[in-house]
Amino acid sequence: MTIDSIAARFATEGSPGKVEVHSGGFINDSYRLVNAVKGAPDYLLQRVNHNVFKDVPLLMNNMSIVTDHVRAKIERETPGEVKRRCLTIIPTTDGQSYFKDTEGNFWRVLRFIEDHLVFESTTDPAIAYEGAKTFGAFTVMLNDLPAGKVGCVIPDFHNMKWRLTQLKESISKDVADRLKEVKKEVEYVETRSKMMLTIHELGEKRAIPLRVTHNDTKISNVLFDLNRKGLCVIDLDTIQPGYVTSDFGDGIRTLTNTGEEDDPNLDRVSMDLELFEAFASGFLDSSRDTLSDTEKESLLYAGLLFPYMQAVRFLIDYLDGDTYYKVKHPEHNLIRARAQFKLTQDGEAKMKELRQIIRKLS
Ligand code: GN1
Ligand code: MG
């Protein structure tokens, strides 16, 4: 089917005829539908990758529940801004949240949010603060939406215990014959596993609550307005039940790294304390009164857990022969794993400072 004929299945306003490829995001394909009618909005047409997301109807149902919930809150607080502060799903002409084409692809349409800025990465503490504040506010808006209302899109996604079990399996199979190259990394994983299961155990004991969490809190998943103020959280595909530590931890992992996620030069990889403080400060400024004391204490461990978990995930994929992440060369997953271990170790070395920051801000 052509993009035009797919777009025609949705209940859009005006005449959104012109199609432009929209960059951003490696998982889904996105197109901007430019409206020919003045005053009518543009739209974002997306093909949802059903190889990564096995249950797109469940994902879209989560997205509808969450956007309805958030919209109701924004409508009460800042009525004029609903369309900019919350994603709007445009239904199909027969009232569905997605359209499945004849080839089995899943499509959705969102209202395009005009006049926004996106930061792929940043070293500016003011942007880190604003982005984190927007994620924290999202957590707060979802505080009264019971976790059981949304479905699990990727089972055990951020379950450290499960990731360690997976690693054991990959080690014992060693299908790609690479175990001999990663002895040091495997040893490191073992020496830290007890500490890294802290959050999992708090969850098991229900000492921290299951919430509806975003699970992909990189800075590029916040839209900013032209004054560089946080506007809207986007990319709701991985919304599912989780702990607040996921949204804090992955934000810290992606934002504070002075190197690249796959930096081959480990000297460049470290946890930037100023960015850590900016992110923690923004996140807590919006969520301080909502999070429990135990949740706030757990944020410290989240900052170490997420680089570690990501390292373990890359290591697993390396041992498995690169079946999950796209790689540019055979050593890519190993290099990524090493960079994430380095970030973890640097975080460990700065534990005292990180603890002080979290305490001060809690
Ligand atoms: C994947 O594709 P992207 O960058 O949004 C992964 C995340 C990892 C990240 C590491 C569904 O996310 O969990 O943290 O790569 N998403 C999924 O770069 O596995
Ligand atoms: Mg994503």
Image: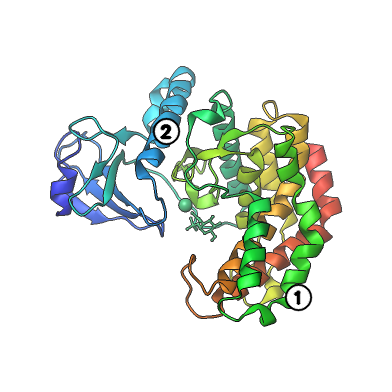
Local SS, label 1: helix
**Which quadrant of the figure contains the N terminus?**
bottom left
Disc 2: residue Cβ within 8 A of ligand 2's nearest atom: no
Q: Disc 2 on helix, strand or loop?
A: loop
Does residue 14 appear left or right of residue 162 in this picture?
left
| Nearest-to-viewer mark from 2 and 1 | 1
Question: Is residue 156 among the parts visible in the rendering?
Answer: yes
x and y percentages locating residue 44 in the rendered image: 29, 45
Instruction: Report x, y in % for residue 188.
Output: 77, 68
Q: How far apart are the two marked residues, 2 and 1, measured between alpha carbons?
A: 46 Å
Q: Quadrant of the C terminus?
A: top right
- Answer with the quarter of the image where residue 264 lies: bottom right
Q: Position of residue 269 (x, y in %)?
A: 68, 68
Type of residue at label 2? Cys
Query: How many numbered marks are there?
Result: 2
N-terminal-most mark, 2 or 1: 2
- Residue for point 55% across, 26% down: 146
Q: Residue at x 60, y 62 (%)?
A: 313
- Residue 4, percent across and down? 14, 50
Q: Are marks 2 and 1 in contact (CB under 8 Å)?
A: no
Residue at figure coordinates x 50%, y 80% from the top left: 329
Which amino acid does the dot numbered 1 rest on?
Answer: Lys
Instruction: Say whether residue 61 is left or right of residue 212.
Output: left
Determine if the C-beta at disc 1 is less than 8 A from ligand 1: no
Above or below, 179 against 28 in this view is below
Residue occupied by mark 1: 184
Residue 362 visible, this orientation: no
Instruction: Find residue 86 and name its label.
Output: 2
Q: Identify which residue is drawn at 71% across, 44% down.
A: 200
Q: Is residue 134 above or below residue 30?
A: above
